[in-house]
Image: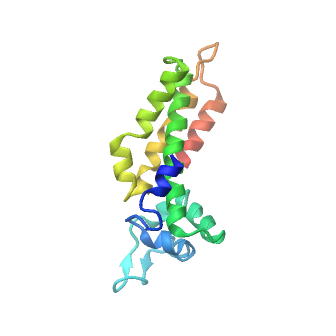
Amino acid sequence: MLVVTVLHRAGDLLPETKLDLLVDPGRFLSRATFFWDASADFGRIQNQAVGYLWPMGPFFLEGDALGIPPWFVQRLWLAALVVLALWGMHAVLRNLEVGTPASRVVGAATYALAPSFLATMIYQSAAQIPVAALPWIVAPLVRRDPDGTIPRRAAWRSGLAVAC
């Protein structure tokens, strides 16, 4: 998946709704918590910038700190979303004891490679974080326990995925 993602228009930044996050993540994050942004146009009210504080913002900030080109960090981010969606859906299917190990991989890949997920992710990747997180929210809650209860640890894991 990473190879396909990196080779797609290698060297070019893909259009993203918060292009300034990709180009200068430190500057973007430093002004994300302020209501007014004077850096563009004639000034503007921030529109959802705080939603980039976690996990996308730190991901791009770390890539910038390591000197990785923004286009490559963007590809790593996109690949990470797909891998998280696939891995999480596989956990859901495994916890539900659905199918065989091979069919679980096929089912998880079908979820993670859905055209609606991939097409939107290219230009609005932050909006796809919930799609990648959903299986991680559900997986702990559908795990079978001998006594039929959902342990606190499962609820905690699910809540942590919601918070992310």
Q: Residue at 41% across / 64% down in the picture?
A: 48
Q: Is residue 2 above or below residue 73?
A: above
| Image location of residue 52, percent across then percent down | 49, 62
The coloring applied to the image is rainbow
Q: Quadrant of residue 157?
A: top right
Q: Residue at 56% across / 69% down in the picture?
A: 69
Q: Is residue 6 above or below residue 23?
A: above
**Figure label count:** 0
Nearest the camera: 143 or 86?
A: 86
Left or right: 146 with respect to 19?
right
Q: Residue at 53% across / 59% down in the picture?
A: 56
Furthest toward the bottom, the residue is: 42
| Image location of residue 164, percent across then percent down | 55, 49
Nearest the camera: 40 or 66?
A: 66
Nearest the camera: 41 or 8?
A: 8
Nearest the camera: 30 or 5?
A: 5
Left or right: 76 with respect to 126?
right
Q: Residue at 41% across / 33% down in the picture?
A: 110
Left or right: 96 with respect to 128?
right
| Image location of residue 35, percent across then percent down | 44, 74
| Image location of residue 132, percent across then percent down | 48, 43
